[in-house]
Amino acid sequence: MNGNPNPKPTYSFELFPPKTPEGMVKLADNVQQLNAVAPRYFSVTYGAGGSTRERTFETVALLRDQCIDTAPHLSCIGSTRMEIRDILHRYRAWNIRRIIALRGDPPSGMGAVGTGELAYANELVAFIREETGATFHIEVAAYPEVHPQALGAQQDLEYFRQKVEAGADAAITQYFYNADAYFAFVDACRRFGIHIPIVPGVMPITNYSKLARFSAACGAEIPRWVCRRMEDYGDDIESIREFGHQIVLDLCRRLTEGGTPGIHFYTMNQAAPTLRLWRDLGLPGAGSQRS
């Protein structure tokens, strides 16, 4: 069940662009704390239009100015080829060498998926390769518990394979709390001819009500027994955080013991929960293999 063709695990952190100047100041402080443990890179989520996209650029620039390896998300829904080409040229000029290519969701009020000149992530990956060759290391999304819009697991595997055949180098999964789901997914991918590294995405648990809403929307499953325990804690935030930490810590231990290619931490712009996991896993220095 080893999902790691690469013997050097990669540990990375995801950020999202703040909406306010005050949020950017707070993010800069969290980045300083997170970067102290030398992750392989930070990723930055992407807004598909207007000010949200500009905030992505501002966040990428914040990291670049500190010489931090950065992987901007880039989605294709709602964008023209020219717009995507311009973004790729900007990132290449900024010496960005890693992209996370996603289909994305349409901006509010824009209508159904299909707007823009590229409709799916495999088309975006192919376009990046056509425009920039091997300039970028391209990572794509993978779904151990099946994408919520897929008709089934087999169709989801086929869509994943199309992204790999278009030129993806690696994948990062949607977050999950069942290690067996990840290992079963990797096994299914290998049988299906998909052999790129599949890095598990991990989300620390700090606020159960927000996590439950987010998980319902994105199709990530929270095990029933975990939900019941969380519900029993009610408004006891400290107990929820302590229980959530142990759940995610145990998950990370199973993943690392199973030989995963690393872990991608969804930090939610909070340094403390991720750094606690990092320390309890004994990871200091583990992500320092910069290249």
Image (cartoon, helix red, strand yellow):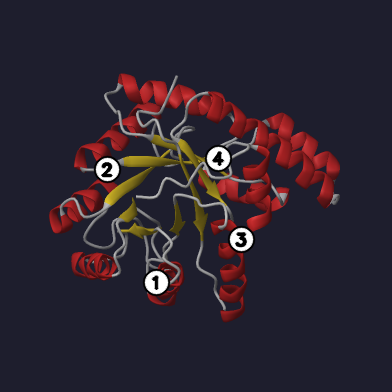
Q: Earlier in the sequence, mark 3 or mark 4?
A: 3
Kind of residue at badge 3: Gln
Residue 57 - label? 1
Q: Which residue is mark 3?
A: 33
Residue sitting at x 34%, y 46%: 139
Note whether residue 120 is visible.
Answer: no
Residue 168 - label? 2
Q: Badge 4: how crowded within 10 Å, few (<14), some, or many (20+)?
A: many
Find numbered disc 4 in the image and state the secondary structure of the residue it sits on.
Answer: loop
Q: Badge 2: how crowded within 10 Å, few (<14), some, or many (20+)?
A: many
Kind of residue at badge 1: Phe
Distance, label 2 to label 3, CA atoms, is 31 Å
> As drawn, is 168 to the left or to the right of 147?
left
Give the number of marks: 4
Pick the front one: 97 or 217: 97
Distance, label 2 to label 4, CA atoms, is 23 Å
Label 1 close to label 4 by CB (< 8 Å)? no
Q: Badge 1: how crowded within 10 Å, few (<14), some, or many (20+)?
A: many
Q: Is residue 121 above or below residue 261?
A: below
Find numbered disc 1 in the image and state the secondary structure of the residue it sits on.
Answer: helix
Kind of residue at badge 2: Ala
Distance, label 2 to label 1, CA atoms, is 23 Å
Q: Residue 162, how many percent across, how many down?
A: 24, 37
Q: Nearer the viewer, mark 2 or mark 3?
A: 3
Note whether residue 195 is visible.
Answer: yes
Q: Residue furthest bottom?
A: 21
Q: Badge 3: how crowded within 10 Å, few (<14), some, or many (20+)?
A: some
Q: Which residue is mark 4?
A: 220
> As drawn, is 69 to the left or to the right of 286?
left
